[in-house]
Image (cartoon, rainbow, N blue to C red):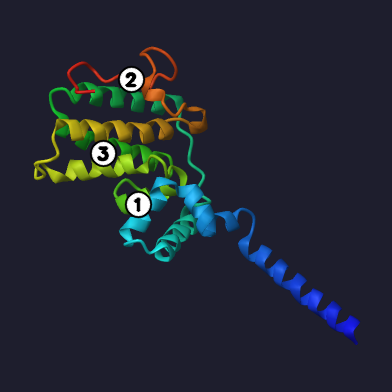
Amino acid sequence: MSTVLIVGALVVVFVAVVAMVLYAGPGRGAGRGGRGLKRRFGPEYERVVARHDGDTKAAERELAERVSRHGDLRPKPLTREARERYVALWAGLQEQFVDAPHQAVAEADRLLARLAEDRGFAAATAYEEQVAALSVHHAHHVDGYRRVHRAAHLDGRDPHMGTEALRAAMVDARRLFEELVSDHPEDHARHAPHRPAGRGHRFHAPWPKGSGA
């Protein structure tokens, strides 16, 4: 009788374990657990927790829902011509920043929206949805997009948004731009913007003199 009970208990445990594995699915467990979400989202995890006033459960529910919606997204490749066009446009914005920083930031916001749409991260007109999708795949740099977007829509109303703050927003946004414009973002060095001009990827254009960089 005791043998039957032991076998029965083992069967129940086995079924429970199988059910948990099937529910998690390949790769889903790491994406849903708090530790997995924190590792996946990095600074984005901390930002969402802060927005939920320290409520980690609420933050993790939000991030898990983002993974569920956008985790399977496969970015569309850019043609060589499109990539070169985007690189040239961003370099032009860096030049424009010297004389018209607010306008350059506004253009950078629109450029990132179009680039994200071309890569398959929702329509350019759906900013919140774009950011949510980008946060799943580019969590360490998506906040640069938020910064230029906020700056672009302040329209000079924030007295603290001076040239240096705008330049910092552009620098952060450029890191996301560099990932989106490449089909292999994992090949980028973490400190690529500090490389000497003319070396490495062509889109690491230096800031022009007088830009405050």
Q: What's under tag 2, amino acid-wise?
A: Ala
Q: Residues within 10 Å of mark 1 (few under 14, many from 20)?
A: some
Q: Quadrant location of residue 142? A: top left
Q: Of circles 3 and 1, which is in front?
A: 1
Residue at 30% over, 27% down = 90
Q: What's under tag 1, amino acid-wise?
A: Arg
Residue at 63% over, 65% down = 23
- Which residue is under mark 1? 47
**Which residue is more in the foreground, 75 or 165?**
165
Q: Residues within 10 Å of mark 2 (few under 14, many from 20)?
A: many
Instruction: State how far apart marks 3 and 2 are (Cα).
Output: 18 Å
Q: Earlier in the sequence, mark 3 or mark 1?
A: 1
Using residue 156 as the reference point, say whether residue 91 is left or right of it. right
Residue 203, image x, y percentages: 38, 22
**Which residue is more in the foreground, 113 or 54?**
54
Q: Of circles 3 and 2, which is in front?
A: 2
- Which residue is under mark 2? 205
- Which residue is under mark 3? 109
> What secondary structure is marked by label 3?
helix
Residue 179, image x, y percentages: 43, 33
> What secondary structure is marked by label 1?
helix
Q: Earlier in the sequence, mark 2 or mark 1?
A: 1
